[in-house]
Image (tube, coloured by chain):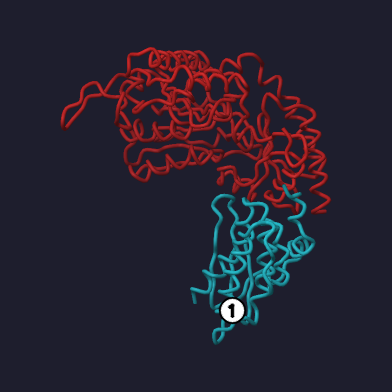
Chain colours: A red, B cyan
């Protein structure tokens, strides 16, 4: 593919990853063959759709280290986090309890907690990070905490949070730990058992799958006790005229016809990512991007470990960087990346961000380095 | 597709580098701030209006080269104009920025013709319009 007459160097996988043929083919097949309504109609096409959904549920469970009944299909990480806020938190967070998030959080792991804390009269405590963009564990107080919600990998700083340690400290005070895994799943092996968290959320489209498809994993004992969120078809056990009873988990949390096409794509994406070692394969590209930014005189936000590198170039606004880079065929992101508090922490109004996927190679890094030099010619 | 470097007309780069009327305006009678929530950019326009004429104008804020240059050219243009003239001018600029990339450039835009390049970049049009929207809002205050 060519962009503005140049080869495409796609460095925006943290926003959304490009999809391989296998994912597209799986979604096409879901449209052409597995075209019924799953778990409702009984004909062959519906049986095929049910098979797609339940096979993918088992694959996601294996991918995360959970069991299939702990896997809830959602529309994405945002919906998964809101589900926890609107069900578990609404039922369990009380006045003067504390919900902890961090300065790293994407707005999707901040605003739902702001909303539920405002509703409940609970305190939202912002855990600090250090100058490298890592959580400053020594300065986090877990006092009165009821729920802790933290990004596994920061979408701006590119740092990894110590989830197992956070889980121990949260559980010591009786709090649950919710992990936003949106930026982690494409770059780290995930095992919820060893992480020790209680909820784990991610989106298919950061993992080479389709948009509009996501996962919430929850510990079975916690999910079983949670009230439903959205009401509708598929989540009910019995329906009376004025009241209803609800099904078991996970059906209780999956009101409405599921996104079969997206779920088919997610299954294919998980099979695709099992064919390579994401972390090892991408370290070289990550180091190359860091070097290119330093060579152009840029300031990197924090000390990124993987996935993303956010930076500023002196005297050039991130939007101008993004537009000029686009002209060189380089797709990168500019703005606050839905992480306004983190930018305030780093005293940056906004930043540019390059991020990598399994297809990122030396040629992409070189094209990015050339683009930075050309931007410097326009804004010397 | 237009080469993005066409966006960065020499006039825009010059105004971004050394913007006119950038800073506070102590005698301001009118003031408004507009945000672009998508990117976090923000511009404040302050005006001193005497007898329906803008006698002083200044801007502050954070933004890309397009919004800074547009704010610089806008404040330059506003000084000495009447409220009605600037209201009409802001409408004309907004229509110009949102016109087709190959449409004729309207008369009497002056330096602001340098924004012609932004017409080919839909996602950047709002950058150029931000200060004009702040101006219109500021004219309603005071």
* Rendered location of residue A261, percent (x, y): 48, 24
How many tags in the picture? 1
* Rendered location of residue A161, percent (x, y): 57, 29
The residue under the point 59% across, 64% down is B95
* Screen quadrant of the N terminus of chain A: top right
The residue under the point 69% across, 72% down is B107
Place residue A253 in its image quadrant.
top left
The residue under the point 69% across, 69% down is B73
**Along the horizontal axis of the image, is A368 left or right of A169?**
right
* Rendered location of residue A172, percent (x, y): 43, 25
Residue placed under numbered mark 1 in the picture = B85
Instruction: Choose between B94 and A45: the one closer to the eye.
Output: A45
Q: Secondary structure at mark 1?
A: helix
Instruction: Choose between A209 and A41: the one closer to the eye.
Output: A41
Instruction: Choose between B110 and A293: the one closer to the eye.
Output: B110
Q: Chain of mark 1?
A: B
The residue under the point 35% across, 30% down is A88
**Along the horizontal axis of the image, is A248 left or right of A361?**
left
Place residue B60 in its image quadrant.
bottom right
Place residue B50 in its image quadrant.
bottom right
Direction left: furthest residue: A241
* Rendered location of residue B11, percent (x, y): 77, 64
Instruction: Choose between A27 and A351: the one closer to the eye.
Output: A27
Note whether B42 is above or below A23 in the view shown. Answer: below
Note whether A106 is above or below A264 in the view shown. Answer: below
Crowding at dot 1, Cα within 10 Å, few <14 / some 14-19 / many 20+, comes out as few
């Amino acid at each position: 593919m060519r962009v503005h007459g140049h080869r495409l160097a796609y460095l925006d996988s943290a926003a959304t990853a490009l999809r391989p043929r296998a994912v597209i083919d799986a979604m096409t097949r879901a449209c052409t063959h597995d075209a019924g309504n799953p778990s409702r109609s009984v004909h062959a096409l519906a049986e095929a759709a049910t098979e797609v959904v339940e096979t993918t549920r088992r694959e996601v469970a294996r991918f995360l280290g959970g069991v299939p009944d702990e896997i809830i299909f959602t529309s994405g990480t945002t919906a998964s986090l809101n589900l926890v806020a609107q069900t578990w938190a609404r039922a369990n967070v009380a006045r003067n309890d504390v919900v902890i998030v961090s300065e790293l959080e994407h707005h999707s792991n901040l605003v739902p907690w702001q909303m539920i804390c405002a509703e409940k009269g609970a305190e939202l405590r912002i855990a600090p990070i250090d100058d490298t963009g890592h959580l400053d564990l020594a300065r986090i107080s877990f006092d009165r905490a009821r729920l802790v919600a933290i990004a596994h990998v920061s979408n701006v700083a590119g740092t990894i949070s110590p989830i197992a340690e956070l889980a121990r400290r949260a559980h010591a005070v009786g709090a649950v730990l919710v992990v936003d895994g949106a930026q982690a799943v494409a770059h780290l092996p995930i095992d919820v058992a060893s992480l020790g968290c209680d909820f784990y959320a991610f989106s298919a489209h950061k993992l080479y799958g389709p948009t509009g498809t996501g996962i919430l994993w929850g510990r079975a004992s916690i999910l079983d006790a949670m009230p439903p969120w959205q009401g509708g078809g598929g989540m009910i056990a019995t329906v009376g005229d004025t009241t209803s009873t609800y099904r078991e988990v996970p059906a209780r949390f999956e009101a409405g016809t599921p996104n079969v096409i997206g779920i088919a794509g997610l299954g294919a994406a998980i099979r695709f990512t099992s064919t390579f070692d994401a972390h090892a394969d991408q370290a070289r590209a990550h180091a190359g991007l860091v070097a290119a930014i330093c060579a152009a005189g840029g300031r990197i936000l924090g000390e990124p470990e993987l996935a993303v590198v956010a930076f500023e170039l002196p005297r050039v606004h991130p939007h101008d960087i993004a537009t000029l880079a686009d002209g060189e065929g380089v797709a990168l992101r500019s703005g606050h990346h839905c992480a306004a508090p983190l930018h305030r922490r780093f005293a940056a109004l906004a930043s540019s961000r390059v991020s990598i996927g399994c297809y990122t190679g030396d040629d992409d890094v070189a094209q990015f380095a050339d683009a930075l030099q050309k931007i410097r010619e326009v804004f010397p | 597709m237009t080469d993005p470097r066409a966006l960065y007309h020499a006039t825009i780069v010059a105004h971004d580098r050394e913007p006119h009327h950038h800073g506070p305006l102590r005698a301001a009678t009118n003031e408004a701030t507009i945000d672009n929530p998508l990117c976090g950019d923000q511009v404040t326009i302050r005006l001193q209006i005497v007898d329906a004429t803008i006698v002083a104008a200044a801007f502050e804020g954070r933004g890309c080269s397009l919004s800074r240059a547009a704010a610089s050219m806008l404040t330059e243009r506003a000084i000495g104009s009447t409220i009605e003239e600037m209201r009409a001018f802001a409408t004309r600029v907004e229509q110009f920025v949102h016109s087709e990339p190959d449409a004729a450039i309207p008369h009497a835009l002056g330096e602001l013709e340098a924004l012609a390049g932004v017409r080919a970049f839909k996602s950047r049009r709002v950058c150029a319009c931000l200060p004009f929207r702040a101006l219109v809002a500021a004219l309603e205050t005071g």
